[in-house]
Structure formats: structure tokens, C-alpha cells
Image: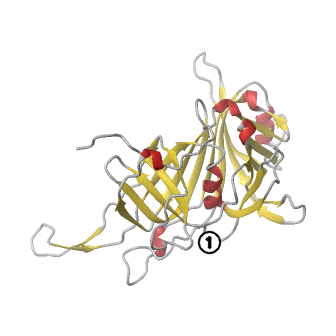
Amino acid sequence: MVSRILRYVGFAEETEYNVDPVPEAEFHVDISEASLDVPSETQIMFDGSIGRGQRLHRPGFYSPEGDVTYAIDISTIGWLFKWALGGYVFTADGGEGTGHNLHELYAVDDVYLPTFATRLGKDVFEHVFSGCVANEIELEVSDEFAQATVSILSAKDARNDLEDVADLKLPDEFPLAFHEVTMNRNDIDVSASVREVTLTVDNTAEAEQGRGLGSRYPYRIPANARNVTLEVTLFFNSMDDFELFWGDADGPSDEGTTEFDMDLTFDAGDDGKLVVEFPRAIYTGLETQPSGRDEIQQVGSVQALLADVTLDDGETIVNTDIYARLENDGDEMVVV
């Protein structure tokens, strides 16, 4: 019988893919929901001809997957970006804030991204997932808290005992709310026109591509095409977004849409800040659809494009479609 509700998630980067033993969690967060679970259809059914029913089965391919959602904080969100993007540079005391360290995160072309372990508390037991890859990360800001959802592909799962609440390594920093997030477009603050925004980094990874002889678990989980997009819901109070979408003030231009740059800032006050930049972006869609007498809202679909970005050292240039500057009091995000 379940005697308490205890649901959490703990993460730890792996020294190598699906390492054994599974590392203990480096940090925990309180979750709002999680679908990370055992896979379905894990048995191979032999389609024989002796009668109409199923007779024979054998163990088949096995790879758990699912999502974890939580309210983000300035301490833990950097790890998710590191696992989803792959590029990372640390500079001690490099932040603009007093005493803050600087973490620069950017997308790389590596097929094999950093892997991690996930420990998910489920009231009765701790469900442990190893060989995890961040297939997709989604940041959503609309009302109340800013939330992150990480879609995880995993090599294997196991059982462990629940952590005691007193032993959970929860962040000291508060979760960020919608009013602590702002947006700039072409260096102009457009926050007052933005009702909600969702950022998605999709690595289009597939666990089945890691199948091989001799194991029912994936030997690797490679990433494929990366797609960085935003969906922005706007108060419709000007023609600015139409002009960017059309590439002209009065209608669609033969030259196509106009490129622009965007950034999102998550301001945690004295604890630091996260600035996520999209150096080149275009509108791929712009819905402006009246309904009755309700206020018209625009829904813009934004595609991030590759561009050269110079890192904080003033010398290193990376080609990326997303670049994040995280300032906090956290140490370098490395396996210890």
C-alpha cells in the first residue's frame, strides 16, 4: 500500500554511454508531470499458422522513453541545455553579475550527444533510467511558472529504493515565473506584445538506430537533424510581424521573408540569468484569425537558422542556430 506521495527526478551526466554502475543523482527537481516509463511491445510474437491465436514469443528490442516536466530554475536548466545542444564552455567569474560564473552553451554537429542517468521517484520505488539522451527540450512561458519539458530516450531501466526527502539535492534557487522572462527582436524589447512563447530544440534521435546483434538494448542513440523553433503568441497591435513575414510592408516580396534575430532572457535577480539567443531567424508561418469580438492574436512560427557566433573569449567562433549565456553561482558542469 502506498503510504505517501513522493515524486521527483534526479539527473547525473554519465562518464560514458549507459555506464555501469548508474551514477547517483547530482541534483533533483520537483516535477509537475512525467511520462518516462517502460517501453511497450517488448516481445517478439511469432506469427505462426497452427491455429488462429498467438503461441510463441521471445524478448524483443527494449528502450524506455518519455517526458519529464518541471518549473525551471537558474541552477539546473543549464544541464538540460548542455545535454540537448552538446557545446559547452565554462568561465569562472565570467558573468556580468558579481561573483557569477559564465556557462556558454551552443549546438554542435556531433551525432553522439552527452548522455545522462535519470532517477524518477514514483511513490513506491525509484525508477532508474541509464543511457539517456535529450531527444527534445521544450521551454514554455505563458503564465505562472516557466516550464521545461525534456523528452528522453533511454537504453535501459532498473529499480531502486526511493530517496528520503531530506536527502534530495534540490536547488536553492526559486523557480522562474512568466514575469521574469523578456523577449527582444532586432534589439527591441517586444515583451509587452508577447502573450506566450514556446522554444523547442528537437534532435530527432531514434533509439532503434542503435540496435545491433547480441543485445536487446540499444548500443548507442544517435542524433539526426536538429530543428530549433519557436512558437510565439502575440497581441496584434501593429504590422511589424507581417512585414517580417512578407519581407515587405504591403504584401509578400519576391525576395521572401526578412531575417531577424531574437533573444529570450530569464532573469533570476541576484541568482543570475539565462539569455537564449537566436542570431538568425525567420517566420515560417503567421496566423492572424479573428473570432467574434475577441481580441485578435497572432501566432507566429519561427525557425532558427545557423550563424557564426563569437564566444566570450572574443576568439572562438561557433556555427550554431542557438546560443545560451547562463550566469549563476554554479561550478563547471562536468562529470565529477
Amino acid at the residue labelled 1: Val
In the picture, the quarter occupied by the N terminus is top left
Q: 171 or 130: which is nearer to us? A: 171
Of 237 and 14, which appears nearest the observer? 14
Total marks placed:
1
Residue 243 placement: quadrant: top right
Q: Residues within 10 Å of mark 1 (few under 14, many from 20)?
A: some
Outermost residue, top side: 293
How far across and down, in percent of the image, does residue 309 sit?
83, 59
Q: Outermost residue, left direction? A: 51
Q: Which residue lies furthest to the right in this view?
A: 314
Q: In which quarter of the image is the C terminus?
A: bottom right
Residue 255 location (% of width, % of height): 83, 50
- Image spot of residue 97 (x, y percent): 81, 44
Query: What residue is at 58 percent from the left and 34 percent from the top?
Result: 145
Q: Which colour scheme is used?
A: secondary structure
The correct choice, above or below, for 89 with respect to 98 in the image is below
Camera-nearest residue between 12 and 322:
12
Taking the spot 57% from the left edge, 72% from the top edge, the residue there is: 15
User: Left or right: where does residue 25 sit relative to residue 299?
Assistant: left
Asked if 86 appears above or below 177 in the picture, the reply is below
- Where disc 1 sits, the SS reads loop
Location of residue 146 (image quadrant): top right
Q: Mark 1 points at which residue?
A: 111
